[in-house]
Amino acid sequence: MKMAKKVKAIVCTQCGSSLDLFGGHNVDTIVCPACNTCLDGKDEYKAVAQFMTLMKKMPNLPLKIGMKGTLKEVEWTVIGYIRYREDGEKYYDFQLFSPTHGYAWLTRNEYNYIFSRDVKDMPDIIGNPLDKLYTGVKFTARDMQFNVIEKGYEEIDFVAGELTWQGKVGDGTGYVTGAKPPYLYTISEERNEMSFSFGEYIDTELVYKAFGINEAAPKAQTVQKGGSKSSSLMLGIPIILAFVVAIILIVASFVLSGKKIFSESYKCKELVEGKITKKFKVNGDNKLLLLDLKTNFSDAWGFFTLKIVKGETEYFTFNKEIAYYSGGYGEDRWSEGSRSEDVYIRLPEKGEYQIVIEGEGGYGISSKGFRNENLTVSIYNNVILSRYFIIAAILLGFILFILFFSYIKDNIEFDN
């Protein structure tokens, strides 16, 4: 582990502790590790703020203030760091300093490291880029085309060491990051001020070797197509599960369509005077039943009245009209109406029931009565309404769309 020699030392104006300084003349603030006071590096180290809540314990990080390392053939010293939080996740920006090359940042995010520097190059976006750039949109900066992979808002919850700006706990920054692996371009906005940085992914083992860290380097996430293998896997698994659930729902819609407990066919002519069916048995209270009425109508119509009775008690009465007409040949063939109708009912108690059926009808446009048409009445017990499967399918479709969109977002193809 290589540590830099201190440039000078000062005394904290708040608590009197001795502070070693490693940065250059552009250091704006220094945070005292003893009392968590932010000192103004431009005004005789006067106290700017004191962080009393979120900075009680220093995080255990492989990179520590004062460590020296060579990246991009330049020797850098870690002079400070900031921890950001966004949506429950956290990452660190380490402030680096070189007497010959100025200042840079080394960002540690999910065990990936990004080396970046502030640049003056602006993107080819008129107006505020943060208002116009969203995930998947392309923009040009530094003569390179970047794809937006992230947009969000991050807040500081830990500050330590020396910084080139006044980073305070609770401060927030809006940002947009575009990628053209292995390069990144980030646009940031804080207090209505825009800043731009250009970075590059650095292998974790290379960072550890450069700064003389003796620990085993965690395996870095492989960044490809704008996302990590783990994020693609985590998105891919729910998609597969959603497809499996969708298949189960489709199968269930057939399996759970109900058990047939009754079926009889009648000549429609017999129904003119009324007909009572055989008894059918319902085994449970408040069971949902499906009454399926089917005919063999052809250019005919029928109007049927059905009454559900149990002994002398009448439970339901309903009317159904069935009509079906067709004509023409080949491409000119047409049809209208239907040969069947369905009715859903709930019977309040178990027992044996019958149906009283009356009907009248005709053929063509006449009311001359039935010819040789038949009516088949079937009853299904323990039915699950199809609309529940439709609602579930719609919800699954929406989830699949969101997951697939996120999956595509995390796996955008980038041009090399």
Image (cartoon, rainbow, N blue to C red):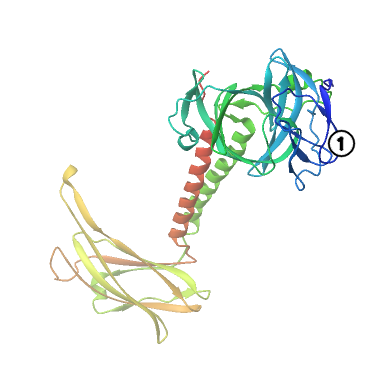
In the picture shown, does residue 333 fall above or below 363? above
From the viewer's perspective, tell me whether residue 378 is left or right of residue 84: left
Q: 62 or 297, which lies in front?
A: 62
Secondary structure beneath dot 1 equals: loop
Query: Which of the 4 image quadrants contains residue 107?
Result: top right
Query: Which of the 4 image quadrants contains residue 27?
Result: top right
Q: Name the residue located 47 percent from the left edge and 23 percent from the top edge.
A: 140
From the viewer's perspective, tell me whether residue 34 is left or right of residue 97: right
- x and y, in percent, of residue 205 in the image: 75, 21
Q: 263 or 115, which lies in front?
A: 115
- x and y, in percent, of residue 73 in the image: 71, 12
Q: Residues within 10 Å of mark 1 (few under 14, many from 20)?
A: some
Kind of residue at badge 1:
Ser
In the picture shown, does residue 400 fall above or below 324? above
- x and y, in percent, of residue 164 in the image: 68, 29
Whether residue 412 can be seen here: no
Q: 400 or 12, which lies in front?
A: 12
Most distant residue in the right direction:
17
Quadrant in which the N terminus appears: top right
In the picture shown, does residue 35 fall above or below 96? below
